[in-house]
Amino acid sequence: MRPSGAVAIASLHAFAAAPSGNAGATATESLSSGAAGCASCPLAFSCDLLRCGSCGYEFPRGSKLMAWVKRLLRRPAPGLAPRPATLDDVPRGATCVVAAVSGDARLRVRLAHLGLAEGASVRVDQRRPTLVLRVGATRFAVEPDIARRVTVHAAGAA
């Protein structure tokens, strides 16, 4: 009886990928791509295995498709428990109210000196190339990582 296609391919690949016996290699040198280590293998062009140079053990590098599916499944469904909005989420021209500022005390004090403190009304004047905000008569730019630390809510909401 003939083995199934997947078993036949796996056994053919295992036969072509003999261990190299490089016992003195370091950890980074001993793991090689299956395609580079199996040049004589007929499946080398599509091989995505890593192989230990010391013992010959092979394992899959990881599927890009499966990584994409895992990221897709981790995303929350729209409308179900959304994360708190940050300044980075506010569209150009919209006004919002600062709910909280996270980060170290030094950052919070610097933003408070600019008027960006809890309860302040903020208007987003520009989004690109950087976020330009208007708080009262003060207009200033903030980097996106700082904008993600400022939690906001809609101007009419409590």
Image (cartoon, helix red, strand yellow):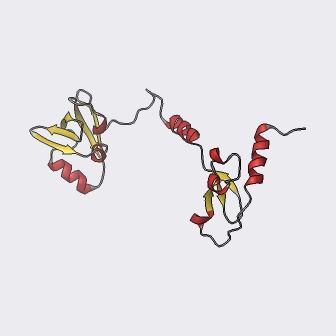
Looking at the image, which residue sits at the far left? 137
Q: Quadrant of residue 18?
A: bottom right
Could you say where residue 110 lies in the image, as x and y percent from the top left?
Answer: 19, 52
Q: Nearer the viewer, residue 137 or 126?
A: 126
User: Could you tell me if residue 116 is visible in this image?
Assistant: no
Vertical arrangement, residue 13 with respect to residue 94, above or below: below
Quadrant in the picture for the N terminus: top right
Left or right, 79 with respect to 73, comes to left
Looking at the image, which residue sits at the far bottom? 24
Left or right, 47 with respect to 8, comes to left
Q: Nearer the viewer, residue 34 or 70?
A: 34
Vertical arrangement, residue 115 with respect to residue 124, above or below: below
Looking at the image, which residue sits at the far front? 40
Left or right, 155 with respect to 148, comes to left
Could you say where residue 83 lies in the image, as x and y percent from the top left?
Answer: 39, 36
Q: Nearer the viewer, residue 114 or 54?
A: 54
Vertical arrangement, residue 32 with respect to residue 142, above or below: below
Q: Quadrant of residue 155?
A: top left
Q: Quadrant of residue 121?
A: top left
Residue displayed at 81% across by 37% down = 4
User: Could you tell me if residue 75 is visible in this image?
Assistant: yes
Residue displayed at 65% across by 57% down = 37
Residue displayed at 61% across by 60% down = 31
Quadrant in the picture for the C terminus: top left
Could you say where residue 108 lies in the image, as x and y percent from the top left?
Answer: 23, 51
Say how many tags the image has: 0
